[in-house]
Image (tube, coloured by chain):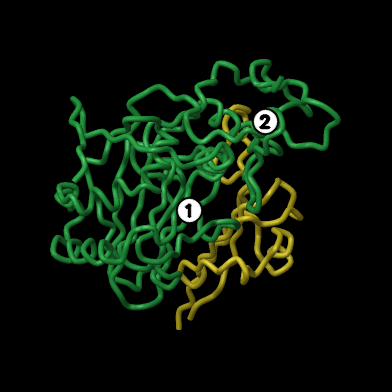
Chain colours: A green, B yellow
């Protein structure tokens, strides 16, 4: 078993970062990242058995199991992504929730989880793990891409229903998806009888942000694609670009350089003949 | 035999405040039931299509939510429509 050193708050962990600049930026735009089927079947089965033996809503004792810590919480791909988004020595979960439901069930109301804050920073992540496969018929979590940039109180979302561009996180057993805490989500409607376990836990930042993930030599802040594609943004035109650029620069430790001049300047996408006007001086490639 | 009047509701979130704007979200309350058609089966593509089908707009997008340029509020331009039906 690996060592998970204790701090005054919790156990922390460090590992190799796995995401590139482009992947971190994609996370900023979408607000989530799906890692399909990364946990081995044997571990998934043990986790499912544990959930069935401990059917309460907060089976936190599973975090004392080394097989679970090593293969789920500190899985190289999952923790590597967390490492990129929260920096080194991130805090490990000390609370486990299980959204265990007997299906079929109607859809939940859209919501942001309690404690959500509207912000352009990232101090914690909310992560979900399916120990068993979850098909569309089993009511997977439904996420609205980019909605971490949409301010609304959960109590004012209850009348929303079907939303264009929403993403149903149907996935095989062993899938882990990492989300920005305040992203809009819900349990989607399920249509077949069954039992769905969905484990949910948080990681926390302990260090200041910096660009210490996998750098791409050809990544250019001036011309990077900051736009959210393939889904309505529910924002004013190009606002998605400035929102994701602002969060991305914060993650790079460069939030002091963020400024939007307006008009057709950085960071909106366009077929320009040169460096976009308004590109922060410190971000221009020499 | 008494007749009751039931109110159906249609919540439509549109791209902008025009009734011809594409719909991006939908929730229907019909016969006292909540109905969420899949996007592929939405009965209306615009608010105007719903109006032409007999729905009456009872609330236009709330402009008071759009006064802060620094923050995007929720899904934006929401129309609420009703249709009354007699139930015996």
Q: How many numbered circles does the render carry?
A: 2
Tell which circle, 1 or 2, labels the residue nearer the N-terminal end: 1
* Residue A41 lies in quadrant: bottom left
State left or right for residue A260 relative to residue A160. Answer: right
Q: In front here: A233 or A225?
A: A225
Rendered-image quadrant of the C terminus of chain A = top right
State left or right for residue A4 relative to residue A17. Answer: left
Percent position (x, y) of residue A38? 39, 58
Residue matched to label 1: A143
Percent position (x, y) of residue A110? 44, 53
Percent position (x, y) of residue A54? 14, 60
Mark 1 residue crowding within 10 angstroms, few (<14) / some (14–19) / many (20+) = many
For the point 43% across and 73% down, which residue is it? A137
Q: Are marks 1 and 2 in contact (CB under 8 Å)?
A: no
Residue lying furthest bottom = B1
Mark 2 residue crowding within 10 angstroms, few (<14) / some (14–19) / many (20+) = few
For the point 59% across and 35% down, which residue is it? A216
Can you say whether A244 is above or below B39 in the image?
Answer: above
* Residue A225 lies in quadrant: top right
Q: What's the mark number on residue A102?
A: none
Can you say whether A205 is above or below B76 in the image?
Answer: above
Q: In front here: B26 or A50?
A: A50
Percent position (x, y) of residue B38? 56, 68
Q: Secondary structure at mark 2?
A: loop
For the point 18% across and 25% down, which residue is it? A8
Q: What's the mark number on residue A220?
A: 2
Q: Secondary structure at mark 1?
A: strand
């Amino acid at each position: 078993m690996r060592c998970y050193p204790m701090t005054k708050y919790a156990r922390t962990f460090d590992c190799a970062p796995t995401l590139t600049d482009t992947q971190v930026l994609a996370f900023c735009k979408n607000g989530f990242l799906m890692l399909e089927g990364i946990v081995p079947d044997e571990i998934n089965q043990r986790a499912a058995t544990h959930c069935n033996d401990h059917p309460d809503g907060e089976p936190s004792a599973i975090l004392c199991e080394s097989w679970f810590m090593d293969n789920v919480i500190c899985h190289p791909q999952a923790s590597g992504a967390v490492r990129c988004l929260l920096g080194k020595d991130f805090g490990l979960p000390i609370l486990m929730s299980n959204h265990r439901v007997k299906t079929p069930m109607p859809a939940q109301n859209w919501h942001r989880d309690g404690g959500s804050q509207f912000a352009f920073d990232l101090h914690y992540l909310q992560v979900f793990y399916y120990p068993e496969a979850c098909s569309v018929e089993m009511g997977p979590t439904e996420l609205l891409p980019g909605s971490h940039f949409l301010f609304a109180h959960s109590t004012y979302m209850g009348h929303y229903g079907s939303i264009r561009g929403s993403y149903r996180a149907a996935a095989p057993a062993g899938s882990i998806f990492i989300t920005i805490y305040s992203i809009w989500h819900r349990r989607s409607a399920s249509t077949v009888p069954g039992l769905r376990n969905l484990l949910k836990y948080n990681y926390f930042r302990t260090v200041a942000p910096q660009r210490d993930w996998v750098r791409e030599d050809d990544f250019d802040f001036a011309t990077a694609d900051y736009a959210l594609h393939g889904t309505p943004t529910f924002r004013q035109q190009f606002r998605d670009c400035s929102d994701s650029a602002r969060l991305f620069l914060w993650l790079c430790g460069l939030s002091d350089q963020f400024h939007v001049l307006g008009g057709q300047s950085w960071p909106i996408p366009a077929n320009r003949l040169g460096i976009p006007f308004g590109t922060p001086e410190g971000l221009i490639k020499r | 035999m008494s007749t009751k009047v039931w109110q159906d509701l249609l919540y439509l979130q549109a791209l902008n405040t025009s009734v011809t704007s594409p719909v991006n979200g939908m929730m229907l309350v019909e016969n006292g039931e909540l109905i969420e058609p899949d996007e592929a089966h939405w009965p209306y593509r615009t608010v105007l299509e719903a109006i032409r089908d007999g729905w009456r707009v009872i609330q236009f997008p709330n402009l008071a939510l759009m006064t802060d340029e620094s923050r995007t509020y929720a899904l934006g331009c929401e129309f609420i429509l009703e249709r009354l039906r007699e139930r015996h």
